[in-house]
């Protein structure tokens, strides 16, 4: 279970801009190996993103969705970085 004392620091960036950044309790992303869920204190990971939505559960209970394609996801020390050639917030 995620430890609220150690929230995830999440950044989603495209080739041209920061799309979203903030604290979260969970991130779910589609990778070339399938869907991956990230919570606090997750093992370090580097994965290739598949074309799809990234779902972020913020600490205040809101859901943020961003479409990401052509990039990678990095997780280390409760920092999640999603770098995509194309990324945008999904309404």
Image: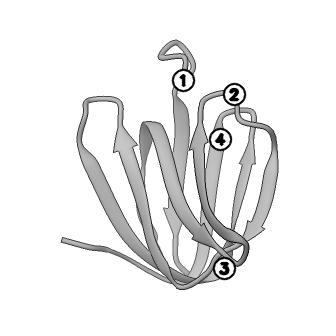
Comparing labels 3 and 1, the label whose residue is closer to the camera: 1
Of labels 1 and 4, earlier in sequence is 1
**Residue carrying label 1:** 2
The residue depicted at 26 percent of the width and 29 percent of the height is 60
Q: CA distance from mark 4 to mark 2?
A: 9 Å
- On the question of residue 21 being in view, the answer is yes
Residue 49 is situated, as x and y percent measured from the top left of the image, at 65, 75
Between 8 and 43, which is closer to the camera in this rendering? Answer: 43
Q: Nearer the viewer, mark 4 or mark 2?
A: 2
Secondary structure at numbered mark 1: loop
Query: Which numbered disc covers residue 71?
Result: 3
Q: Residue at x 79, y 38 (%)?
A: 43
- Circle 2 sits on which residue? 41
On screen, residue 43 versus residue 32, left or right, reads right
Image quadrant where residue 71 sits:
bottom right
Q: CA distance from mark 2 to mark 1?
A: 7 Å
Residue at image point 72% right, 48% down: 75
Please determine whether, in this image, residue 65 is positioned above or below residue 80.
Answer: below
Residue 81 locus on image (x, y percent): 63, 56
């Amino acid at each position: 279970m995620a430890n609220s004392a150690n929230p995830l620091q999440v950044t989603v960036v495209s080739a041209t801009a920061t799309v979203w950044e903030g604290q979260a309790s969970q991130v779910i992303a589609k990778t070339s190996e399938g869907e991956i869920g990230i919570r606090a204190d997750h093992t370090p990971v580097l994965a290739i993103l598949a074309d799809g939505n990234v779902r972020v559960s913020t600490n205040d209970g809101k859901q943020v969705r961003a479409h990401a394609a052509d990039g990678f996801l990095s997780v280390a020390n409760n920092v999640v970085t999603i770098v995509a050639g194309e990324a945008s917030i999904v309404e």
